[in-house]
Amino acid sequence: MSHSEYKGLFIIMYKKVYNLCYQHTSVIFVLWALWLSSHSLLLGPYSFTQLHDNAECYLPAKMSIESIQNLYPFSKWNHQWQAGSDISGTTFASDIDTLLFLLFPGWLAYGLFLFIQRFIAGYFFYRFLSDYVDVDRASAICSGLLYSFFSYNSINAQWDGFFLQSGLWLPGLPFILWAFERIRRKDTFFSIIGAIAIGFFIGISSIYVYSMFAFVAIILWLIFINPYELKKSSLLIFICIIAWLISESPFILSGLMNGPFSQRTNRGADHFLLGTNWHVIKLMLKENILQIVSILIATLISRKMNKKNIWLISFSIVFLLFFLFYNFFFNYIQIHFGLFKVIKFNNIYLLFPFFITVVFGISLALIKDMNITDVSGSKKIKVQSLIIFIILASLILQSIANKEIVLRYMMKGHIYTNLFEHPIIKQFSEKNSNDTFRVTTMSGPGTLLPPSSLWAYGIDTVDGTVPLHPMSYKKFWAEIIHPELKDVFMKRRGCELALYSSINNDKSSSDIFNNNMLSLLNVKYIFSTRPLRNISLKSIDFPLNTELERGWNKRFKIRTFEFLTGKYIPYFPIYVYENHNVLPRYFLVGKIKQFNDPEALLQNLKTSSIIDLRENAFVMENDINQTWKKTLNGKSHGSVSLKQQSQDQLILETNSDKSSILIVSQTYTPFWTVYVDDIKQKIFAVDYTLQGVFLTKGKHTVSFVYSPTYY
């Protein structure tokens, strides 16, 4: 073909694509969403997987829930997470994306969900503005593309756009308002049905601590910004909230009942200092600079301010001010929050990007008929078109820059196969699949082995990131890690538990963590990305590690094409150590050590030898009655065998020569019930944070049942 023929073919193709996009606007947003999510979807299992708040917690949690629900449908307890954790009390369980992980491989479910987020955010933002805010088509499309991009480092480091933690409530906010505008213009019956459907959608879009803020946007929009039949709108909002409460009721009740004794009750204002909040606000304003400048230009040129914009800007400023000064009044009012004090109400600032982008779209529409002349003065240029061109060019350039950042992260090992199909961990998991034990992970800045990642392999851990766990377990963990890290851990690391280390490699593991307390938690193996030294640890040899070390060291020398096609995967080396002092998951003790102060109990536990921990139960005096005390006075000889186990039930058979306490190395919460020979008995906290039950001598069948009152 000649040059002119190629040119003609290109023009024909261009016109066809243009006409397709013009006639079917959804195609634009499908292509844009596909471009934004391509590095996490189109490369298959070799796709990019963001570590922060994705691969380090949410993604392995989803994969863990998927395996649990396949084996034990409707279970409420997960023994894999942090020595046992309530599933429904976390931010992992209620999202609609869990369905994708039940149907597809983890990498595909993850990539598809990111694509869905970006498409819904962009397309329905366009529909919302064009259908109900009187914004012209070009301005609405530009605004939709802008919101779909959602590159915000200021919002929990979402520089690559929406991630799993966002669920569908934040990207789905335009859809929610668009749907509400539609239903409130229908007949009463269909309006009520629609309000119920929207309420359930909000309920399954994300966990309640986030999705609740969607109602703030709904109320502000329908009542103040775009009022229409206020009486009917108020009724529909009320119905929607009731539907949301019903759909979220197990999770709300779980959070509210677990919350008062969780680690979140101790997260005071010092967790987010004023300086930190101000830094977040400055960063957010910087990230919205193009929208803000465009709004100012449009306002100056048009010489008028849309009434909706006045409301939107006012609410946006209030959101930021509330976020900035939240810590000051939080200290004074949190004691009055009751069950709700575990909720971070300052998350209302998450609505700022949506509101400011709506203002941007409305402002662009105000100047659609205004022109400026070029330098020669012979040609008129539309101001709106010029601004849209600048915005779209900036979006494309920034998205390309993000791809370059993604590639650098991928070269560092941030890919799905490296994190969740690592050959060393797979070998370990297959070899030890029939044993009962837990593991922990040595973690540090920039580690590629976050503790939670092991959940995806079906491995029980004592650490990881769980948004809601007992405060007693966090304090117990604070005594395990190195003293120099304890203060920072208690104040800053609200949800994550790991063997944090800022210690140099020449230190032994005994200088980094308390091995005896780990042994008490049934920790048999320790994973690390660097070698450790300890007389109680035995290195587990994996011959493959030598090859992985060589490949890992040359990862930056390979060709990009080989890397992206999966011909070369830079797996990082993993060192696994066996703990010879590990205590069983379930064991009997015949002696007790009593305390009146829980902190004194914890400190004694910390300094006890492994023999003391094996032979004694550390208990609070008011948990042990006088009859038990008389019989718990010597070493117990007995056995414990596992008869049956599911997520919500544990059945053990015991046999002992004297009265004893059965210790179960599992997190204590008040929602467990225990039956000894089918008779309900008292379950109490032992060793500060584990489960214990008193048994008389002889043979017994002991059943532990997780039966929270919120079900």
Image (cartoon, rainbow, N blue to C red):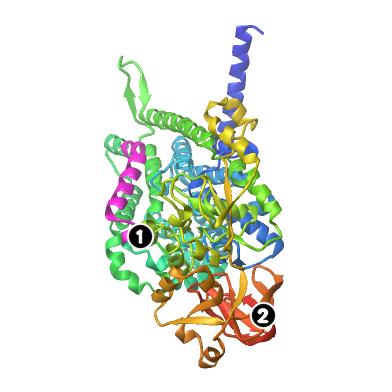
> What secondary structure prevails in the magenta region?
helix
Residue linked to disc 1: 487
Residue 497, image x, y percentages: 48, 58
Name the secondary structure under disc 2: strand
Q: Nearer the viewer, residue 639 or 413?
A: 639
Quarter containing the N terminus: top right
Residue 153, image x, y percentages: 40, 43
Marked residue nearer the N-terminal end (2 or 1)? 1
Q: Nearer the viewer, residue 374 or 679?
A: 679
Q: Type of residue at label 1?
A: Asp
Q: Is residue 217 visible?
A: yes
Question: What's the magenta region?
Answer: 270-294
Q: Nearer the viewer, residue 711 or 637?
A: 637
Name the secondary structure under disc 1: helix
Residue 129, compared with residue 217, is above or below; it is above
The answer to if 10 sits in the magenta stretch is no
Q: Type of residue at label 2?
A: Val
**Which numbered marker is on residue 702?**
2
> In the orientation shown, which residue stands out farthest toward the top?
2
Residue 236, image x, y percentages: 50, 64
Residue visible at 44% across and 29% down in the picture: 397
Q: Nearer the viewer, residue 498 or 456?
A: 498
Residue 91, compared with residue 595, is above or below; it is above
Location of residue 566 (image quadrant): top right
- Count how many numbered circles sit on residues in the image: 2
**Which numbered marker is on residue 504?**
none
**In this rendering, position of residue 299 left or right of residue 630:** left
> In the orientation shown, which residue stands out farthest toward the front?
535
Residue 634, image x, y percentages: 56, 84
Q: Residues within 10 Å of mark 1 (few under 14, many from 20)?
A: few
Q: Residues within 10 Å of mark 2 (few under 14, many from 20)?
A: many
**In this rendering, position of residue 510 left or right of residue 1:** left
